[in-house]
Every structure is written in C-alpha cells, then in structure tokens.
Amino acid sequence: MIRIREISLPPEHNPAQLPFEAAQALRIPQSKIYKLSIIRRSVDARKKPDVRIVYTVDVAVGGNENKILKNSRCKRASIVADKYYKVPKCDKVPENRPVVVGFGPAGVFAALVLAMAGLRPIVLERGEDAVTRHQKVQKFWETGELDTKSNVQFGEGGAGTFSDGKLNTGVNNPRIGWILEQFVKAGAREDILFDAKPHIGTDVLLEVVQNLRKRIIDLGGEVRFNAQVTGILQKEGKITGLEINGAETLACDNVIFAIGHSARDTFSYLYEQGIPMEAKPFAMGVRIEHPQTLVDAAQYGAVNPVLPPADYKLVKHLDNETVYTFCMCPGGYVVAAASEEGRVVTNGMSYADRDGENANAALLVTLNPKDFPTDHPLSGMYWQREIEEKAYAVSRSYKAPAQLVGDFLNEKPSVTAGSVQPTYKPGVTWCDLHNVLPEKITNALKTALPQLEVNLKGFAHPDSVLTAPETRSSSPVRINRDESGQSTGLKGLYPAGEGAGYAGGIMSAAIDGMVSAEKLMEGL
C-alpha cells in the first residue's frame, strides 16, 4: 500500500478527483489505481482566505510498489504496512463473570473487549438507558426538574453522550482506528474514520451507544440499568463482591471501575473503605459563547458555506497557571449538566450537523492540589461542590450565572444580553461572576482574555457571553493503580477511565477502558 500525503484541493472540490490527483503524484495512469482509501482529511487555513482541504490517502496499485514509488520521485509518498488491533484471546473463563461498573466510554469499550473475548461481562450502570435518559435530560433543560439518578452525567453512554462527541485525542495509540470502526458499525458517519477532528454529535451518539450495548448483549454480555454500586465486599485484600442499590449482593473477583468524573458518592465510599486515592490536577472556569459566524470569519478569513463550521483551540501560559479552551463546540449549545440538587454545572454540546447559531467552549484555568482549599484526597471534589452551590445561590434555581465579557473585564454586573444570545437552558441569571468564582480563576481569566483576542479576533468581544461554572472538565481524583492495572489497595479492582483519573475525553477514556480489560484478562 502506498500512502500519499498533502493532496491539497479547494473547498469546492469533488472527492472523485482524488484518484486522479494520486495518479498524478505517482506519475502513473489512473487506471493503475484499483483502490483508494482516505486516511486523513483536514482544513488548512494558514493562508486565509485561501483555505484548502488537505488529504492523506492510501492507494493499492497494479505493479511493483517499490518501483512505482522510486520512479515517481514523490517525497509525499511512502509504502506503509497495515496495522490492525486485535482483541486478545482469553483461554480461561473465570467462574464469576467480570463486572464493569459504569457505561460511559471507558465502560462501554471495556465491556465490548471482554464480550468479544468470550467473557460475558456484567455491566452495572447507575443511570438509565439512552432513550429514558434523553427524555429526563430534555425535561430538566425545559423545566429545571432534575433527576439525580439519570441526567447529563449519569446513564447509558456517560457524560460524553451529551457533548459534541469529539473523537480527537492527543495520544497515538493503535486502538484508535479500531474504536472509530466500532463507532461506525454502531451507526456513526464514516467520515470519522479520516477526519482530522472527528466528531459524532449528541443526536447520533444517542443511537450509537444503544447499538454498542446491543452488540455487547449479543456477544453474551449483560447490561443492568438503575444499578448503582453502593459498597465493595473484600477479603484478605481481594475483592469478593459488590453491593448494588444498598440491597443486592453480586459475587465477583474482577471489577473494572469506570465510574466517570462525577460519581462523587462513589469516590466518597471508596475513600471510606480505604481504597488508595489522591487529589490530582484539573481545571475549572466558564463556558464562553460567540456567534459561529465570528469564529468562521476569524479562522477562515471569510464565511464560506462550503467549509465546515470552524473550531479553535487556544492556550495562554500565565505566571502561575494556564488558561485554555477545551471541548469547543462549533454550532453548539451551552447546557445544564448538574447531577446533584442545589448545584449548577455547565457543559457544551453540539448536534452532528453543528448548525446552531453560536459556538461555545470551556475556558478553563489549571488548578493543582496546592491550590485546593485543604490537603485531602477529595479536596478538589469538595471545591467543585462549593462553587456549584454558590452558582445555584445566585437565583436559587438551575439558571446559570452569566456575564458579558466586556462587563467581566470591567468588573461590572451584567443586566441583559448584548448581540450574543445565550443558549443555556433553563436560562441564565445576569450577574458579576467575580462573586461566584474563586479569585484565582477570575484573575486568570481577566488576564488571559485580552491576550487570547490576539490569537482569535473577536474572542474577547464585549458582547460574548460567559456562563458559569464549568467544573466537570475532568476528575479531581486519581484512584491509584499499579502496573497490573489493579488498585494498589485491592486486588481485582481495576480503576479505569476519566473518573479514575486516567483519561480526559471520549477517545482516551475508551482506550483506557480497553487497556483495563486487557489487563484483567492477563490477570486471569
């Protein structure tokens, strides 16, 4: 297989042109290319407004690949070998079926690997199935009526289901391609296989996670909803069972704990039962919202309906902390993401088409354990709660505190929206965010905003909306594990994913879930 990089075409191109471009690069007739696969597609806006679409393709050719490559003298081409991830085989089937706690990305892919290996896993998910969960989330956004058991954080698919469904990650791992293929088999669009910044979208994810669940069940697995783990049974340093909903007991020897970053009650009882854990760095801040047309114009040099809605990724290193954007949602919405009564939480979400009027992103400040109010493994979690409660107190409801960027920089309370209408439901309460967020966060944001304007024109526009608080960007806790993937304090317990402190997004969580499943099988 010959790989050709940097095939650059205008936005209005026809993808059917790619075989011709590949043949030109290799200096062979197009008829000699009998298969072409797109490996990567990205937008190059470095010379705006002359934006280009850039492809990397693999081609199968008739003839000797080495000879064709040599004759082409194409520095953008090389011979590549196919690399495929294979689910490990497991010759030993334990008497007690392995258990996966949590059905977010880490739990889903841990269960899928175990099921494909023939181990018939049992999945315990505290929330509800995707359909029921979606109904309750919509009701919360419309009425402010929160279900603490089934919400944006808890339920089938995990917190990532109500997000943009971004699948890009900073890690280079052979499991990535396999994960993307499983998403496509479950109903995601095929372009996630090659887009440089793939995403699925909340509307499609709701179907995808159900299809992944059905596949796990077809392979012999079992998925139980409304099944919250409320205790761990152990003997001589080894897990022997789980308590479910404070009543039922399930005997087990091997458990993957993929509990998610918001399972605060679970963190608490794990700590009380002596499971080793530590506070870890994380970030908090706000969501910032702009018109999508502003972002398009800034990134592309002009608004071009042929191009996808533009995104951005910004970072500014200050003296003692870093301010950066995260979970950027083109054409998206700021959404209510609370999971506990009397606490306000925000997040960002996009649908597959990303056709909303506004763009939004988390604007976060890095925080280290030395910044936390106390020296305790759960101090970051307690700090999150304190901020969320203060946000709720602004209106005594799940309406989120909000402020215009111009007013925030001038430390002046906002009283109404400007040219940017906030998308947060069930609504915002205009105020001064300096009275809601810790001084460390507001000072950093105030310093960084004008500097980020240099990187993205319009980012600090006075009418841009800040909605607070964004507290759940990642877990504030790490559950310690050793090289075998098991808890350092309890054999048979495999902490995994974002909630355990080992991932930061859908893809990295899915990878960590798979690795935990592989470690579990090695332990057998």
Image: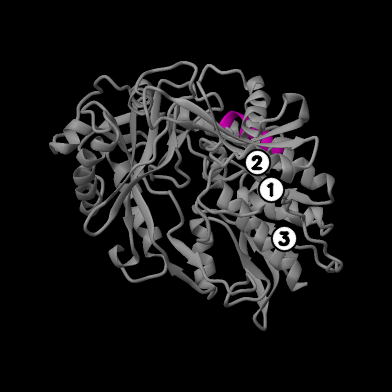
What stretch of residues is rendered in magenta?
Answer: 201-210
The answer to whether residue 390 is magenta is no
Q: Residues within 10 Å of mark 1 (few under 14, many from 20)?
A: few
Residue at figure coordinates x 62%, y 35% from the top left: 192
Secondary structure at numbered mark 1: loop
Which of these two is toward me, 149 or 55?
55
> Cβ–Cβ below 8 Å for labels 2 and 1?
yes
CB under 8 Å between callouts 3 and 2? no
Q: Which image quadrant: the C terminus?
A: bottom right
Q: Where is residue 503 in the image (x, y as percent from the top left)?
A: 52, 56
Is residue 227 visible to the viewer in this orientation of the structure? Answer: no
Q: How crowded is mark 3: few (under 14 residues within 10 Å), some or many (20 or more)?
A: many
Question: How far across and how far down the image is residue 168, in percent?
Answer: 53, 43
Q: Distance between the residues labelled 2 and 1?
A: 6 Å
Of residues 113 and 122, the one nearer the viewer is 113
What is the magenta segment's predominant secondary structure?
A: helix
Q: Name the residue under label 1.
A: 80
The residue that label 2 is drawn on is 3
